[in-house]
Amino acid sequence: MLTEVVGFSFGPAAGLCRRPLFLALVVLALGCGPRPAPPAVEPARTTVKKAIAELRASQPQTARMLERLLADAESITAFEREAPFWDHTPGRTEAAWLRLAKLASVTVREKRERQLAARQQFEQVFAKATNELSRAQQELSETGMGRREAAAFQRAKGALGRAQALARLGQWGEANDLARAAISDLAIVHREFGALHARFSDPNLRRQWRDWVEQTLRESREQGIVVIIVDKLKRRLSVYRGGTLLASFPAELGANGLRPKQHAGDRATPEGRYKVVQKKQGAATKYYKALLINYPNDQDRARFLQARSQGKIPWRAGIGSLIEIHGDGGEGRDWTDGCVALRNADMDKVFAWSQVGTPVTIVGTYEH
């Protein structure tokens, strides 16, 4: 019997040789088959894709980084699925996806935390800005506030409108910046309002105004005469006879009435002790009825000359004149060129009680 042909053995010995070869082929076949993806891959993939979608608009660089890492994780998964057993690293796929999913989750959480903090900050800043806007609107209605303050108010109002629109889109950072810019503009209004009213708290001015009022009321008591007192800050004209109050009326001042009058054309209402020098009605006045006072008096002239010598007043400016208490008021705002305006019905009473020589004292303010 032939037992060996061209290097091949037959018989029992050959069977023993073929058994290890068969086992190797089986193992090789098993190692070359594709492996199923670990169960953790799909949830991690979903987490990462959602994170990329959420971050793309607000953090595009971070979104692109996660996309690159996602591609890397997909490559690792594909390689490990197809790799033969001797090139396969157990747990590598799971580790890659776990790291990526954790990074995506942390990034999204931090982004949401920042958004929440920015939203809460915006809500606080916007509430403050809204209150400041309301306050500034009231301050702007005050006499003496200028175009600069009005322009600042309009800028702030526009900025708050845009901030609100951005907030609705979730763009909290930009909305915050606009709300803060609005507050800065409104501060311009507040500062000017404060400066305008600072003089009404000045103890020296308040003492002077009080002395003028007390002197006028003493004159009324001692002589039994009618006197008129105007409180600019309170916008009130009060009439006394014999030191006793007859009536008090709302009054309107010059367009810059709260400021001290310095020269002609400044539309400020003067402060001082004056007298009626002429009563006007009919064709003599365009304001229903009027009481012309003797502005400027000697004290006004002295202040004017001193201010001009100090360069506080333009050299060619005049001191002004023709300050009256007149009718056609009731507009609810300060609008005159420096006069004191009353409603016509109130002017009728004041006109009837007054005569040439009636004392008229105009002060910044005083305690009644």
Image (tube, rainbow, N blue to C red):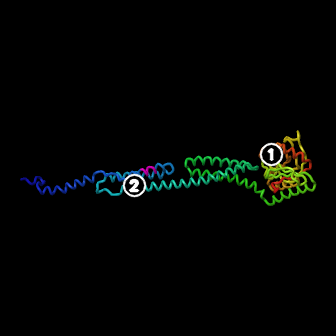
What secondary structure is marked by label 1?
Answer: loop
Percent of width and height locating residue 318: 84, 49
Q: Which residues are magenta?
A: 46-51
- Residue in view at x 40 percent, y 52 percent: 43
How many numbered discs, if any? 2
Considering depth in this image, is 208 or 119 the residue closer to the camera? Answer: 119
- If you read the primary sequence from the N terminus, does the residue marked by circle 1 or circle 2 appear first? 2
Instruction: Specify the amino acid type for callout 1.
Output: Thr
Is-magenta flag for residue 47? Answer: yes
Q: Is residue 79 left or right of residue 7?
A: right
- Residue in view at x 85 percent, y 40 percent: 286
132 vs 344: above or below: below
Numbered badge on residue 97? 2
Instruction: Specify the amino acid type for callout 2.
Output: Trp
Residue that numbered label 1 is attached to: 336
Percent of width and height locating residue 2: 7, 53
Real-space CA distance between mark 1 and mark 2, rounded to the nearest whole angstrom: 79 Å
- Neighbours of disc 1 within 10 Å: few (<14), some (14-19), many (20+): some
Residue positioned most to the left: 1
Q: Is residue 13 left or right of residue 302?
A: left
Percent of width and height locating residue 297: 88, 52
Q: Is residue 74 left or right of residue 183?
A: left
- Residue in view at x 88 percent, y 39 percent: 282
